[in-house]
Image (cartoon, rainbow, N blue to C red):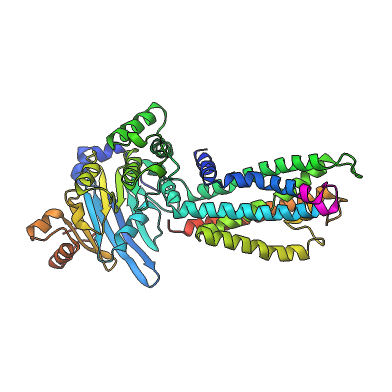
Amino acid sequence: MILSTHVTRQLWVQLRLLPLLVLPAIVAGLATAVQGPLGAEGGRFVLGIGFALSALLSAALVGAAFADEIGSGAAAWLVVRAVPRTALIGAWLGIPAVAIGAAYVLAGILIGLAIPASSVQPVDPVAFAVVVAAAAAPAVPLTAAALAIGAREPARTTVLATLGLGAILALPASLIGELAVHPASGYWLVAGVIPADRPIAVGLQAIGLCLAVAAAAWVAAARTFQRRDL
Amino acid sequence: MPISTPDALWSSRAAGMLRPAAVELRDVTRRLGDKSLLDGLNLAIPVGARVLLAGVDPDAPSLLLRIMAGLAHRDKGSVTLAGLRREATIPEGWARRIGYVGADLGIPRWMTAAESLDLAARLSGIDGPERQRQIDEWLRRYQLGAIRDRPLRHAGRITLERTALAAALLPDPEVLLLDEPLRAHSPADRVRLLSVPGGRRTVLIASRYPAQEAGLVDRVVLIRNGRVALHAPVSELDAQRLSLSLRGLTALADVASAPTDGDGAPS
């Protein structure tokens, strides 16, 4: 609890918590403003791309904040007070993940309000919630990967490397986008590229894959942080 | 299995007679690239000693303190502080037994002085009215009242150093590790602030400027070629009419290059 409060305040004071909380809502608002009602295909495509970019930006912000925490000596200050390094990096993933989850709840509400009542297809609330959750989920493994980079590189390098990683991952994800379920399938569901005949199954599989990749990335981040001299 | 020594034992007369080691380093080795900063270093420091760590390579003492604090890794060897052996996991009670102030200080600048002391106390397991009493006491002792409720980003280096030292001393640690401490303070203020109460407290100061630590230490350790080249009381420098400087320490190490015992202490 002490650690969670510390990380939350650290992110808030560095003005990095606010973007995590509002980016998806801004994306939802912009997509509506630019492309019209979200029931339309064009609007959904912009929304899917926007969510992917906001996840990448959020991950880069968290990775940079963690690199700053190490660079400023604040991580060392905690570690000499017997805070386990795994607990520290766990808090640095857990708090942003909760913030991102809350942000997508807000974005989901905005999207729900933007879908016109006269929409041709009625919205299934369960499927809608799963699709929004599947769109939120890729931000977690991306954040864990950014923490792994931030655990050994300074803030600026962390931002550039995270954005580069996103660009690299976008290529295979776009190639297999419609063919198989993968961690980024949530964006394809939102964009309407994957046929929405079974959104719950695809969405849940994508969430599961995201959590598995996030766990692997967090282990890599924790091992990197363990080996680092502070 | 880490060995925990109760405070009562440390302060007992029997412990004083036995002179138990507050710090015990065995075969500590660390290479950085091609450079071997620590090469099988052995050192035992008795309880209550105030020791200056100096090095022919100025990075070696700082690295050694950071290894002791668990911030830097060692390639091999063992580190035992206040009876606690720090391996991959942190032994219970570590936060209350060991204090460390690094050159970077590390306190988040968005915190107030009171908040940083409060966080240090919470992490050390000090709760209830005792926590507030300790915070008030250390704010008063180090004259931090003016910055008590203001973020430390508004504070100068002197205030930051005092806050960092207060946060390290608040849990009443048995071993205090100071890496280039209080550089922004005048020599008189440094002596006053570092002359903290606690007869059983062992203090290790890593310094690039040994002369500035005069009056603070009663023993000196010189690290040369990754090993302890000298471990002697300060009085031996006086006896040889040598100054408390790197040159003086090196000269004394050359004079006293007679065989030493296994822990680097004078035989």
The x and y percentages for residue A178 are 82, 60
Q: Tell me which corner region of the image, top left, top right, bottom left or bottom right, holds residue A118.
A: top right
The x and y percentages for residue B102 are 35, 51
Q: Is residue B172 magenta?
A: no
Question: Does B181 appear above or below B260?
Answer: above
Give the quadrant of the C terminus of chain A.
Answer: bottom left
Q: Residue at x 16, y 58 (%)?
A: B244
Q: Main secondary structure of the magenta part?
A: helix
Asked whether the viewer can see residue B146, the reply is: yes
Q: Which one is nearer the viewer's eye here, B51 or B244?
A: B244
Q: Is residue A34 magenta?
A: yes
- Please give left or right for residue B145 compared with residue A210 in the image: left
The x and y percentages for residue B141 are 28, 35
Q: Which one is nearer the viewer's eye here, B89 or A6?
A: A6
Asked whether the viewer can see residue A215, the reply is: no
Residue ranking furthest to the right: A120
- Please give left or right for residue A76 compared with residue A213 in the image: left
Q: Which residues are magenta?
A: A31-43
- Please give left or right for residue B32 compared with residue B45 in the image: right
Numbered disc total: 0
Q: Residue at x 89, y 43 (%)?
A: A119
Residue ranking furthest to the front: A34
Residue ranking furthest to the top: B129
Question: Does A72 appear above or below B76?
Answer: above
The x and y percentages for residue A55 are 66, 53
Q: Which one is nearer the viewer's eye here, B249 or B144?
A: B144
